Amino acid sequence: MAESIVPPAVSSPIGSAISPLTPLPLRAVLPWAVFVGTLMLVLLYFVGAEQGATSVFSGAGVHEWVHDGRHLLGFPCH
Ligand SMILES: [Zn+2]
């Protein structure tokens, strides 16, 4: 007696069987990927270069807030 290793399909409350894995279309993912990528680049700029090599805000507040992260990621600081 061979048992099936295929997982059973998940049934919706309506009663029809749906696949547990539904692929996401690239059109749905691409705007979020661009948004998160841009956010990460801005964060990387503020951690790595703000109030060091370049400066958008005057003073040293941003530098003090991200100082440990700057050292942790290996950016030159002081
Ligand atoms: Zn430092």
Image: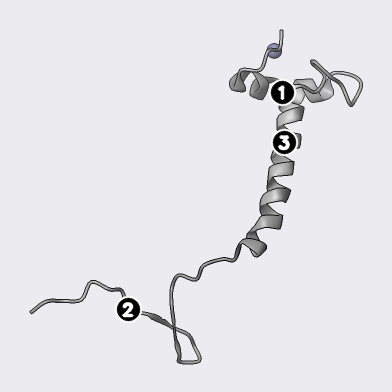
Residue 54 spot, x, y in % from top left: 84, 19
Q: Residue furthest front?
A: 26
Residue 2 spot, x, y in % from top left: 11, 76
In the image, residue 14 sits, relative to residue 3, either above or below, namely below
Q: Residue furthest bottom?
A: 15
Residue on which the image places disc 1 = 48
Residue 45 found in image quarter = top right
Residue on which the image places disc 3 = 41
Q: Which of marks 2 and 3 is nearer the N terminus?
A: 2
SS for dot 2: loop
On the rendered structure, is 18 left or right of 52? left
Residue 16 found in image quarter = bottom left
Which numbered mark, 3 or 1, is in the foreground of this view?
3
Callouts 1 and 2 close, C-beta under 8 Å: no
Residue 59 spot, x, y in % from top left: 89, 19
Q: Which of marks 1 and 2 is nearer the N terminus?
A: 2
Which residue type does callout 2 highlight? Pro
How many angstroms separate mark 2 from mark 3 (CA)? Answer: 42 Å
